[in-house]
Image (cartoon, rainbow, N blue to C red):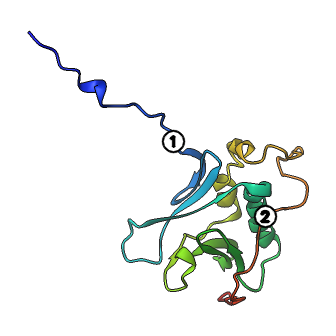
Amino acid sequence: MFSISVFSQIKVLKNESLVEIGKDNSVGLYKKEDKYTVNYQDLNTSNLNTIRAFSFQNLNGDVSGLYKLIMDGFISAPEENIVLELPNDIIELHYEKNYGQPTMQFIQYINKNRKYVGKSQFLTQKQVDKVFGRTNGKYAMYDKASGINQDGKKGGPSTASTTNPASGAKKKAKK
């Protein structure tokens, strides 16, 4: 009779899994430790199974700032895309009316290269609320220091980093 210890070389690691903040169809916001990731199905590719993502940390309330920036675009649609520079990517917020309803779309320049472009589905204001966890209360995971009023909207100024890329090039929104 003999015994073999197979578990002597296997170490169980703590699984720091993604926490879903919110999701609607093919767009979702996730949190892992202090990093936030937006995943989306890329509609700009012939392969419908292509999932793209862009990530950033919640420095200075950037997640709340991004949410507020998107919502402001629904109130007063910008004439041009809003250009955001993230550590690894450039993201444009593109607004367009679809069937008379204002919608927005994430356009991602992967690795800040304008040759590699990913596009999310168009989202309505309600869908953005869902993605950012406004309908399930999970926005508290990134919006800890906010003053919440009765209707659940955040008060106060935005502190998101929304710098333009060094080239200063802006793309006109198609009408």
Query: Which SS class for mark 2?
Result: loop
Residues 100 and 117: in front is 117
Q: Position of residue 124 (x, y in %)?
A: 66, 65
Q: Closer to the N terminus: mark 2 or mark 1?
A: 1
Instruction: Read off the residue under disc 2.
Output: 160
Q: Secondary structure at mark 1?
A: loop
Vertical relation: 92 (above or below) 19: below
- Disc 2 marks a residue whose amino acid type is Ala
Residue type, numbered disc 1: Ser
Q: Height in image: 104 above or below 27?
A: below
Q: Residue at x 55, y 70 (%)?
A: 120
How many other residues sit within 10 Å of disc 1, few (<14), some (14-19) or many (≥20)? few
Q: Quadrant of the C terminus?
A: bottom right
Residue visible at 85% across and 52% down in the picture: 154
In the picture, the disc for residue 17 is 1
Which residue: 66% across, 72% down? 104
Q: Residue furthest top?
A: 1
Q: How many marks?
A: 2
